[in-house]
Image: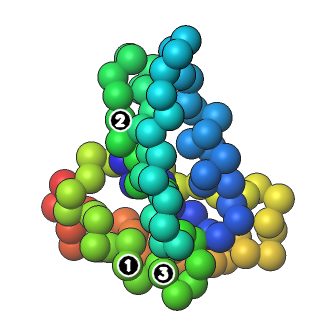
Amino acid sequence: MLVVGLDYSGKTTFIKNCKKLPEGGKEFYTTTPYLNLDMINLPSGAPCIVYDLSGQGRYREGWSYWYSDIDGIIFVVDSTDHERFYVVKELLREIAAHPALRLR
């Protein structure tokens, strides 16, 4: 799964809240300035690797690199950030129109 959204929209917090480690379980987490890699369990119990990509403007063009290798996208929106809703709208349009995703 790819987790995207604007910077400071709550992507990493969302992932952390999805994690439920069993007693004595080890946390799997890798971080870089652009990418956080983690693992969560889906409601079915199946493990899912999530790629938490930076939402800063300079990194958004790099999101499309991942589109062909993912099974889904979670787009996180900060509902209190009214001033940037227009940016969210345009990003969602760009993602939906991307050729790597339209064909899937």
Label 2 secondary element: strand
Mark before the other along the chain sequence, 2 or 3: 2
Distance Cα–Cα, label 1 vs label 3? 6 Å
Amino acid on which disc 3 is placed:
Tyr
The residue under label 3 is 59
Packing grade of label 1 (10 A; few <14, some 14-19, many >=20) is few
Q: Residues within 10 Å of mark 2 (few under 14, many from 20)?
A: few
x and y percentages locating residue 93 in the rendered image: 45, 72
Mark 1: which amino acid? Gly
Location of residue 94 with respect to 17 vertically, above or below: below
Compared with 52, 93 (above or below) is below
Query: Disc 2 designates what residue?
Result: 48
Q: Residue at x 60, y 54 (%)?
A: 11
Give how far across and how far down residue 81 sits, in percent: 80, 66
Q: Position of residue 2 (x, y in %)?
A: 40, 54
Q: Which type of secondary structure does the marked residue at label 1 adopt?
A: helix
Q: Which residue is mark 1?
A: 62
Q: Amino acid at mark 2?
A: Cys
Between 29 and 1, which is closer to the camera in this rendering?
29
